[in-house]
Amino acid sequence: MTSGTLAAAHVDLNFESDEYYQLGGGTTLAALVTVSRASAGYADNLAGVWTSFAVNTARRTDKGLLVEEARTNGVRNNSMTGVVAGSPGTLPTNWVQSGPTGLTRTISTGTTDGIDWIQFAFTGTTTGAGQINITCDTSTGIIAGVGEVWTGSAWISNAANTGVTSLFLRNIYNTAAGGFVNVTNSAQLVGSTTFTRRTVTGTTVATTGRINLGVVTNNILASTAVNFTVRIGWPQLELGAFATSPIRTTTVAVTRAADAVSLTTVPTFAAVYSLLAAAKPAAPVTYAGHQSLLTLSNPAGSHLTSRSSVFRALTTGRPTIEVNNTDVAVAAVAWAQDISGSVAAAFEAGNQALSFNGAAAVPAAAALTPAAALTTVSIGSSPLTVFWNGYLERVIIWPNVRLPNGELERLTT
């Protein structure tokens, strides 16, 4: 996207560079934006370091402004409370570990980039066969229902592998009584020496009443020499089709509240206006919910019939603009998951258009009149509880200019 503050813009919020401007307003994020989030929340920077942000505080780093829907981490103790380092050491509360007999287990702990981790080292020669299996909660600790989509995640690295040929992060589906039903495995992780977040997403099957998250190896035969080390950080199990920012727990499941972000002082919108947003979506293209970038609305009227918005559409991932609950222009291509992009939109009676990443502007298919008397500007969310679920990098608003289509294309190149 074009760098620098655009002269005609009344609002320019550059979350990446931490530079802000509003005509007649302040030049700080705190002065221009209001954040409502009823819990603490984490965000990371470009160096991969995670920081906790207090209640009602913008989760802004050099990656941008993180805005997400509410999620709950079902793993009740992902910070490893109760662990005792040593050989064999003591497992964190609620954690369970099993494996082939004959091996010595050594536990160590630490923190990297703000992430609590536990490391297991297994050495020796097996006297019986079995998998090394580490679960992050009990078999009945996390309630689930049939046909639900869950995502497990954890930071994992694997430094030593003698005697081990497979390693997976695993969603484990159990009955309400804790009996095994089925699993979903991640991609192969054996030999993954970099400590980074791994994920696994799966749908619970018939008779599922509980769910768990674990790390498991292949079956290791008796009389096998083993030297195996795995490090696990902040395991998380959440109801949803993708992993959101980490939610730290110590004794019980914890919910991170949704981020509701809005412009504190709303400019006076004319009958024509333009918007631009640069961002990176965390949801997959096929996610079953819209992801809102910017929504202009009038809560005193109807959020459905007094609204103009720019969003990433459900199931297709295509940038879309909406006027009074009608999609009027849709980009030709999907916005890929975890890829930064820019979308610009212009609104005028009978003349709306959008451009995504410099592509030719798509004109409105419907000749509608955009919402008037706008009193709320929602950023990365909407009054209808639709959330961006990712980092917003920059937001620019022209409240009384209908930018030409060529300018929409230029600004998003």
Image: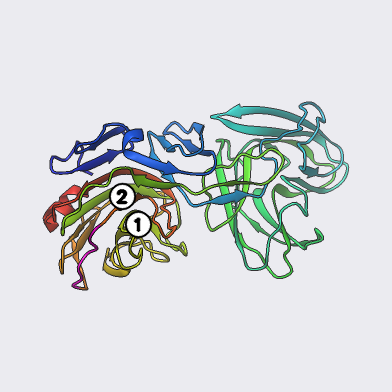
- Packing grade of label 2 (10 A; few <14, some 14-19, many >=20) is many
Identify the element where label 1 is drawn: loop
Q: Residue at x 69, y 28 (%)?
A: 109
Q: Is residue 179 visible?
A: yes
Near-viewer residue (343 or 369): 369
Marks 1 and 2, Cα distance to the nearest angstrom?
7 Å
81 displayed left or right of 126: left
Q: Are marks 1 and 2 in contact (CB under 8 Å)?
A: yes
Q: Which residues are magenta?
A: 367-373
Disc number for residue 335? 1
**Residue 174 vertical position relative to residue 160 in the rendered view, above or below:** below
- Packing grade of label 1 (10 A; few <14, some 14-19, many >=20) is many
Task: Give x and y (percent) for residue 121.
Answer: 73, 33
Identify the element where label 2 is drawn: strand
Q: Residue at x 47, y 39 (%)?
A: 56
Residue assigned mark 2: 341
Q: Main secondary structure of the magenta part?
A: loop
Q: Amino acid at mark 1?
A: Trp
Quick one: which residue is furthest to the front in this view? 300
Q: Is residue 369 magenta?
A: yes
Task: Give x and y (percent) for residue 198.
Answer: 56, 46
**Residue 109 vertical position relative to residue 315 in the rendered view, above or below:** above
